[in-house]
Image: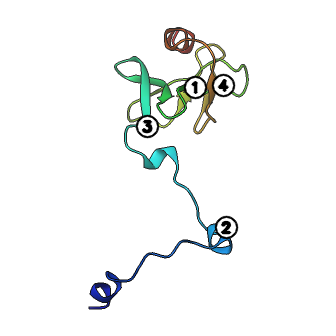
Amino acid sequence: MADAENENLPVQPLQDEELADVAGGTIDSIPGAKTPIYGTTWSYCGYYNELTYEIYYYPCSKCHTPMYTQKFNPVWVCDCCGNKEFSPVAEVWTKSREQLISDALY
């Protein structure tokens, strides 16, 4: 019943003090904003951010070569040096999508 009463109240703008507590969403909360980049049917090596128009990849912490992971496998693999990681940090890729796939998969 309280909700029905509040429906007729005018909307009040937020004050500066209230805006300090407001948080925005993340790209993960927007459906379709991250388009995955697959090297093969089973290997994922990065994503295209449709909001910023940038390609992101997961560099190896040892040699900075793009890593890849496979479906149902939590381990990221670097074919260049053989390093394996569970949660590499994504960085912006400045080359083409095709170059990312080529560099990630030997």
Mark 2 highlights which residue?
Answer: 20
Look at mark 1 in the image and give the residue it sits on.
Answer: 57
* Residue identified by numbered label 4: 60
Task: Specify how the rendered protein is coloured.
Answer: rainbow
In primary-sequence order, the first of circles 2 and 4 is 2
Picture coordinates of residue 21 (x, y %)?
A: 63, 69
The mark lying in front, picked from 3 and 4, is: 3
Q: Nearer the viewer, residue 9 or 104?
A: 9
Q: Kindly give the residue lying farthest to the bottom in the view shown.
A: 1
Sequence order check: which comes first, mark 3 or mark 2?
2
Percent x, y of residue 56: 57, 27
Amino acid type at mark 1: Tyr
| Quarter residue 83 falls in | top right
Tell me the element at label 3.
Answer: loop
User: Which structural element holds mark 4?
Assistant: loop
Q: Are marks 2 and 4 in contact (CB under 8 Å)?
A: no
Residue at 49% x, 9% y: name it.
98
Mark 3 crowdedness (10 Å alpha carbons): few <14, some 14-19, many ≥20: some
The kind of residue on which mark 2 rests is Ala
Amino acid on which disc 4 is placed: Cys
Q: Nearer the viewer, mark 3 or mark 2?
A: 2
Secondary element under disc 1, as helix, strand or loop, is strand
Q: How many discs mark residues in the rendered view?
A: 4
Residue at 62 percent across and 35 percent down: it is 88
Mark 1 and mark 2 lie on one chain; the one further toward the N terminus is 2
Query: Residue at image x 41%, y 79%?
Result: 10
